[in-house]
Every structure is written in C-alpha cells, then in structure tokens.
Amino acid sequence: MLLASCAAGPDFIPPSAPSVVGYASEHRLASTVSASVVGGNAQGFVPGSDISGYWWMLFRSRQLSAFVEEAVRNHPDVQAAQLALRNARESALAQQGGLFPQVTANGSTEREQATSAQSGQWPGQTSTYTLYNASVSVSYALDIWGGTRRQVEALQAQADYQAFKLEATYLALTANVVTAAITDASLRDQITAIEEIIKAESDQLARIQRQFDIGAISKSDVLSQEATLAQARATLAPLQKQLAQQRNQLMAYLGRLPSQDRGEHVRLADLRLPGRLPVSLPSTLVRQRPDIRQAEATLHQATATVGVGIANLLPQLTLSGSYGASGPERLFSPDTIVWSAASSVSQKLIDGGTLYHTKEADVAAFEQDLALYKSAVVTAFQNVADSLRAIQYDAATLKAQAAAEKATSDSLAMAVEQFKTGAVPYVTVINAQQSYLNARVSRIKAQATRYTDTAALFQSLGGGWWNRTDETPDAQPRANPGYFAGPDKKAQEAMR
C-alpha cells in the first residue's frame, strides 16, 4: 500500500502565466475616437473586467442572437465535438477498471454416461451422472509503480482536451456566425448604396442627353456619363455574387442547406456597438483561451505517458486466486471444495531496448508538447494585441471615411452646380461622382469592420465560456450502456 501511494514519472504542474502586465507597450489603452455615424461611438477598455458567456447579445440584435442559437443547436461540428468528449470520458472510466480486482464467476453443468467396459470390465455396466462445476476467480495486477494510474491520468487529460476542443468549436462557430451576419449586412448596404448611385447617375444621364439634344453640350459629355454609369453598374454584380456566397456560408454555419435560406438578415443600422470592452488580465488569459487549455491538456497527457513508460520498465506483480466446487452432487460440501492462490512477478531482462526507447520517445513528445504550449500562448497574446490595435485604428478609419464621404458629397453637389453655370467641364462632375461612390462604399465597410473587430476581441479573450450555463447532453455519459442516441431513427433500430 505504501508503494501504491506513489506513481512513477513526473507529476504534472500547469505552466505559469507569462510575467507581463498588459498586451501593449503602453500601460493603459486610450479610448477610441468617435464618428457621427451609426457604429461610430467611442469605445473604452476595462482591464480585468469579466466577459459574458453570451457576448454577442451586447450588439442588441435579436436576429443576430437567433442566428447564434440556431447555429449552436444545429451545426454538426458542435454535435461531433460533444460526442468526442463523451467518447473520451467513457474511455477514461473504462481504464479506471484496471485499478480494481477483476472477478469472474464460472459455472457449468455436464450430463454424462460412462460404462465399466472403459476400465476393462466385461460385460460392461453403464451409469449416468451429472457433473457440476462452480467457481469464482480473482485476478489483481498490483499497480505498485502507478503505471495504470498514469494511464487513467492520461485518458482523463485526453477528456479535458476534448472538453476544451468543444469550447473552441463553440467559440469559433459563434464568432463566425456573428462575423458572417455582419458581413452580410455590410454587403446589403453596399449594394443599396450602389443602386442608389446608379439611379442618380441614370437620372443624370437623362438630363445630359436632353441637354445634348438641344445642342447645349457636346457628345463627349454624354459618352462620359454613360461610361460612369456603366462603371457603377459593373461594381454591382461582384457584390451580388459576394452576398450570395456569404448567404451560403451563413446557412452552413446555421446547419442549413443553401436552399433552406429563409431570407432573415441583420441590418447594420440595428446593431449597437458596445461602449465598454473587457480586457482580461494576462495572468488569466491562459486559463480562459480554449486553445491554450487544449495545449495544456495535451501536455498533461504527455506527462502521464512518461510515467507509464517508466512504470513499464519495472517489475510487474499479479495476484490471482479461485474458489469453487466441483462434483456430481451437493456442491460446496467439504468434499467438493477446490481453491487456489498464486502470485507472479515478471520483469523483462532483454527486449532489445524497446521499453527504454519507448520511454525516451515519450519524453521527447512531452518536450515537443511543451514547446507547442508556449507557441499557443504567444499566439494568444498576439491575437489579443492585434484585436485591441484593430479596434483603435479602425475607429480612426471610420471617422476619416465618414469625413471623406461628407466631403465628396459636398464636392459632387458643388461640381454639379458649377457645371450648370459652365464654370467647370463635365469631367469634373464625373470625377466627383466616382469619388463619392468610392467614399460611400468605404464608409460602409469601415462601419462593419468596427463590429467585426469587436467580435474578434471577444473571441481572442476566450469568449466567456466559463460564464455560460448551456447543456451539452451528447457529452455526458449514458446511464444505459446499451443505448444508442443517434439522430437517425433507422440507424438506431439497426443498432438494436
């Protein structure tokens, strides 16, 4: 019992968090600038603030929340991750059985007829009798060096890996749905803007044509306006293609087929940009990011596997015994009792170095996983820093794009008035129209980018899974070991 209280190999200790106080060179991040357009409000950062498990609700869009709920409920990747977690948990529970004695009950009944001729007596006489056998055998492999416990530990770490893989799948799916819905809204607004510009330029072409008909302008002005209108129309089809493909992508995230698109969509004007953004402390980020926790679980599994390899190098001790009865009648009477007790020890003396090099390979795998863990931490900190910088600079971009749109709109109005008085040639109007088109589309893109950058920050900080209380029934062990819970009823019947 004293020997069994310890286990061979190193005990796992989670790596400590990086000793830094922030994600940028400055100690405190400044609030973003604001712009007088939808989605242009300033955003401030709150260091150490916690993250909601339902962060997408901060955008205040019922349709966006409905999309996320449908995706989590229907997407096959979430269901597959849940079932992979249940698989890992069941495997760990199965391995725990090796820590207990294995007890087997045996019983048999034989009806036989014998003759005395078999022993040389003649004439032979026959006799019929029934032979009963009943016994219980016990076998217990003593886990002296903790090899079995390390195997259980490794499988439990694998279950932890699958649990955090489920959270990573959940986080990626929700962030992708939010980004896809916002991109969908942006493309719709861009298409609407270009359609309005096409209508305005078509009306302008009609006016130019009337002026040409009365000889007020030259044919070149008409051709220039026709070229501008054609260029505007040429930008419409690519956006419509992007929108159609974006809808297909959104439907895939929702677990639907493209033909099941019911037309629901989010409008940029209906979204609200969160004004206060949580920023987790660096010391807590390593406990929040699912990918870092996955890497940690993998490292834990590798540590336990090293212990298994060390235990396999040491002697293995097994105890066994049986108790039962065998006879033609009156089982378990003193004359029919049979029993046995045995112990065995085994130690490989020569195996060509197989066990030693297997253990060394496990050590190398541990060191590899440690390096990969460090890489995951570096990437996580980079993701957060990138998201913070994106939020800051894209707010400035939106402010500049809003100012550019207003300036080009005013410039276009002035160019039209000056052309009417003959102060400028019509090419000035054409250039002003093109500048206004580009500025308006760029402003819409900048609006959407602010929303997607905010979603990226929540994703890079881990998404608040530790504050979510949703149910994942497919990830739980089943009470009835013979039950199959597949989505296909026919397959369920076939399994039975």
Image: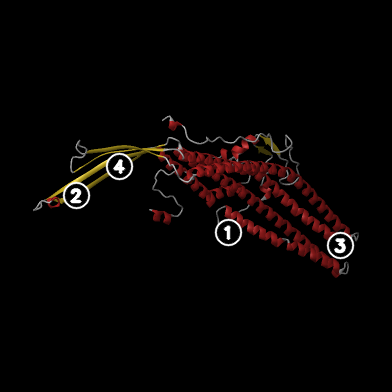
Q: Quadrant of residue 32?
A: top right
Amino acid type, residue under disc 2 in the picture: Arg
Residue holding disc 4: 105
Amino acid type, residue under disc 3 in the picture: Tyr
- The reply to whether residue 285 is in sight is yes
Q: Secondary structure at mark 3?
A: helix
Image-based side of 392 in relation to 320, left or right:
right
Query: Looking at this view, is 293 or 349 the one in front?
Result: 349
Alpha carbon of mark 1 to alpha carbon of mark 4: how far? 58 Å
Seen at 24% across and 38% down, the residue is 338
Alpha carbon of mark 3 to alpha carbon of mark 4: how far? 101 Å
Q: Are marks 3 and 1 in contact (CB under 8 Å)?
A: no
Residue holding disc 2: 111
Of labels 1 and 2, earlier in sequence is 2
Q: Nearer the viewer, mark 2 or mark 3?
A: 2
Give the label on residue 426, or none: 3
Of labels 3 and 4, earlier in sequence is 4
Q: Quadrant of residue 335?
A: top left
Residue 240, placed above or below residue 57: below
Residue at the far left in the pictured view: 123
Residue holding disc 1: 258
Seen at 48% across and 35% down, the residue is 8
Residue 355 appears at what percent x and percent y?
Answer: 48, 43
Residue 99, placed above or below residue 192: above
Q: Are marks 1 and 4 in contact (CB under 8 Å)?
A: no
